[in-house]
Amino acid sequence: MDRRFVALLAVLVLSLSGCTLPAFAPNGADEPARPAGAGASSATTGTADWRPCPEVPRELVGQGARGMSYDCASVPVPRDWNAPHSGETYEVAMIRIRSERQRDRIGSLLLNPGGPGGSGIDYAVYLSFGQALGGLPTEITDQFDIVGFDPRGVGRSSPVKCISDADQDASFGADPDPVSQADFDAIATLNKKIADGCAAKYGAQLPYFSTEQAARDMDALREAVGDEKLSYLGFSYGTLLGATYAQLFPDKVRALVLDGAIDPTENYVRGSEAQAKGFERAFANFTAWCTKTPAKCPIAPDARGAVTDALAKAKTSPVRGADGRDATPGWIFFGVISSLYTESGWTLLAKAIAELQTGDAEDIFELADQYAEREPDGTYSNMFDANLTVNCADNEDAPTVAEVRKLQNEWRTKYPMFGPALAVGMLPCTYWSGERDPYPAGAAKGAPDIVVVGTTGDPATPYENTTDLANMLGPDVGHVLTWEGEGHTAYPQTKCIVDAVDGYLIDLKVPQEGLRCPAR
């Protein structure tokens, strides 16, 4: 597989800029953990009408994984679960990936990569290529059907599309820290235009794209694949989906792994500030790596200075890319953001900034475009349309324009590289006119053990969220597993993490309390 494949696999697990959100023993408390092959559901019946779809992996990466079959289905769900018999529906698309080696099937493992806006179908395909390429271990694919789904409004599932490609370019290319009032007002006007456009197109439907509605869809998917209880692996925003599901359907949970935790108890502003802090910490780790390994970092010894200088120069004399775009501060900023999701991205960032210094913007555009899901022809997926729609439906406490401006100035001092952009990133929801549908933020009473995984160097979902989410789920429900690594999310990065997560998913064996897995 080429570099783009590996990059997509990494970037798909994301919590997007401006996306801030943010028990008792298992049912049958006296039962021991079940051995492999004796999961909560071995049913193969269900209502899903599966059809072979080998074209999906071919379109994504050129081929399917050896020994894997690919089948697709879609499930109609009520547009509004509060009025389930209205007759209005959305289609939620799924892909089922099954290994020819599968034995002693436990059930389906439902996947969500995050966002909101990331495609679970695409991500399941990437994960099907095995652990050598960052995919799932054979121990998992040997006993589970891997089921990826695009949540409502995302990808192939009644997709939301309300931002023009031109407005996407303007948004990503804009100065992440507009200092003058005129520059700030221009970005505010663009954000209002985007929010108004989505309202004009979708109107009363906007609250139907909330996280709670999507979590209720997950139970329909569980029934459709024929599982009595849900086994789920959710990353980043997917942890919020999983936590919401656990609160709504605690008796339907078999096993949930929530990797890269969002804290549902944080309000919109606190969640944005937490991300600013997380990215600032990750960037500091990158710059420290540059200092320690100058042979691998062409912008050493002062990597922060090199990036800051590149952003400053781009305000007045941006480097022009081969496609005619100028590498403005916005494109550079999102290239930096993209690179911090994985430790391997640090090398790419250092190279991209060094090349900018010589008048070559291709690598910084490649990093930014991977993050934005921008194609070479200038078109975008609907990832950020969905991201905006879900975030704004979920949050009823967006700050005012004046409050955003005040936070921008305050966070510039506290988090100089990322604070202003994370403050300004709240503007779309400030202008959002759709009704809101906040998700629940409480204990998952009656749910079995749930594993919450955190990475100490995670930029997008800071490590502090891990304990907060586990505690919210309940002292007998949430269990913390720590990876002392860099980048966004932990599974399946190292043997220690893999063994702990696989043991839980297969045997329902909760990892040792307080387990901390080393970076390598």
Image (tube, rainbow, N blue to C red):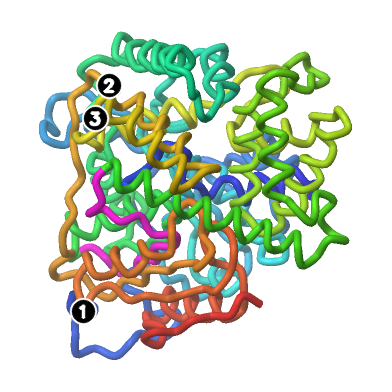
Residue drawn at point x = 37 percent, y = 68 percent: 452
> N-terminal of the two: label 3 or label 1?
3
Q: Quadrant of the C terminus?
A: bottom right
Quarter residue 389 falls in: top left
Q: Residue at x 83, y 34 (%)?
A: 357
C-alpha distance separating marks 2 and 1: 38 Å
Q: Residues within 10 Å of mark 1 (few under 14, many from 20)?
A: some
Residue at 80% in and 54% down: 300
Query: Magenta segment, which residues?
Result: 252-267
- Residue type beneath disc 3: Tyr
Left or right of residue 165: residue 292 = right
Q: Which residue is mark 1?
A: 476
Please state which of residues 120 and 376 is positioned toward the viewer in this rendering.
376
Kindly indicate the quadrant of the structure image that contains residue 77: top left
Locate residue 1, reporting x and y percent.
79, 50
- Residue 268 on image: x %, y %: 28, 41
Task: Mark 3 or mark 2: name the one nearer the start of the chain.
Answer: 3
Q: Position of residue 397 (x, y in %)?
A: 20, 35
Measured in 3D between alpha carbons, the distance from the residue under mark 3 to the one under mark 1, in whole angstroms, is 32 Å
Secondary element at tag 3? helix
Disc 2 target residue = 432
Q: Between tags 2 and 1, which lies in front?
A: 2
Cα–Cα gap, marks 3 and 2: 14 Å
**In the rendering, which numbered label is found on residue 208?**
3
Classify 372 as above or below 224: above
Residue 141 quadrant:
bottom right
Residue at image coords 19%, 90%: 30
Q: Amino acid at mark 2?
A: Trp
In the rendered image, residue 129, in percent from the top left (x then y), is placed at: 68, 57
Can residue 50 be spotted in the picture?
no
Label pair 2/1, CB-CB below 8 angstroms: no
